[in-house]
Image (cartoon, rainbow, N blue to C red):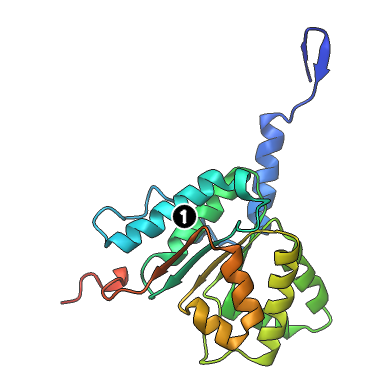
Amino acid sequence: MYKVDGAEYWRDCECAIQRRTERLIQASQITDSFRQMSFKNFEWKMRPSIVQQAFATAYKYAKEFTTIRQQRSNGLCLLGRPGAGKTHLLMATANKLLSDGIEVVYFPWVEGCADLKSDFDALPDKIHRLQRVEVLYIDDLFKGREKPTDFQLEQIFAIINYRYLNRLPIMISSEWSIARMCAFDEATGSRINEMCRGYKVVLDEDGLNYRLRDEV
């Protein structure tokens, strides 16, 4: 508590803010190695222009998040080739939001769907959390098979539709285009497109896989 002109004001002390941030990090499902991913250690200056655009878009999103979070287009979507840096940039964004005291939950598609299906008694609670968390980061959406299962489509629509109706932000990486997502389920794909309309980059050029940079 502090006083100004006789009036009393309350503010969180730095230690309380730090404890909240630590709790958010622990609850985020982000691993220690992913916690090291930041905008500072992303190598972008010598990369193709579309990768530089993705970097600028993710950086701008993280910087402007508090002003756009209540808008219809308040999501971030990086789509396209593997190895282009989508996960690093979205993880850097998630880490920045967490450091600002914003709740983020990381949901890796393949492992996350397996977890949802592993215990049907716990399914409603797990979906409830993914629907209501401040920011949901879905990594590699629809990865793993040529077409999602009916179970996967049912659960992702329940999550995306709730967040769409309540203007809760999403961050998504995927190798699939919005058109292909709409082919799987148009209701889900079109909602993702609208939610991420202002912050969407498609990395679909050849030679973007940074993991193969040493190959001849």
Q: Position of residue 209 (x, y in %)?
A: 31, 72
Residue depicted at 51% across the width and 81% down the height: 179
Return the x and y of residue 168 as percentages of the image width and height: 69, 59
Q: Residue placed at 56% from the left, 63% from the top?
A: 196
> Nearest the camera: 102 or 35?
102
Q: Secondary structure at mark 1?
A: helix
The x and y percentages for residue 211 are: 31, 71
Taking the view exactly as shown, the residue that stands out farthest to the top is 5
Residue at screen point 60% across, 75% down = 190
Write the residue at 59% across / 87% down: 184
Could you tell me which quadrant the N terminus lies in?
top right
Judged from this view, the residue extending furthest toward the left is 216
Residue type at mark 1: give it: Ala
Percent across and percent down for residue 150 are: 68, 91
Residue 108 versus residue 159: which sits nearer the camera?
Answer: 159
Please, is residue 152 above or below residue 65 in the view?
below
The image quadrant that residue 106 belongs to is: bottom right
Q: Residues within 10 Å of mark 1 (few under 14, many from 20)?
A: many
Tell me: residue 99, above or below residue 16. Answer: below
Quarter of the image containing the C terminus?
A: bottom left
In this view, 121 is above or below 134: below
Residue picked out by circle 1? 58
- Hey, which quadrant is residue 111 in on the image? bottom right
Relative placement, left or right, of 116 versus 180 is right
Q: Is residue 112 visible?
A: no
- Kindly indicate the quadrant of the structure image that contains residue 81: bottom left
Residue 22 visible in this rendered orientation of the protein: yes
Count of numbered labels shown in the rendering: 1
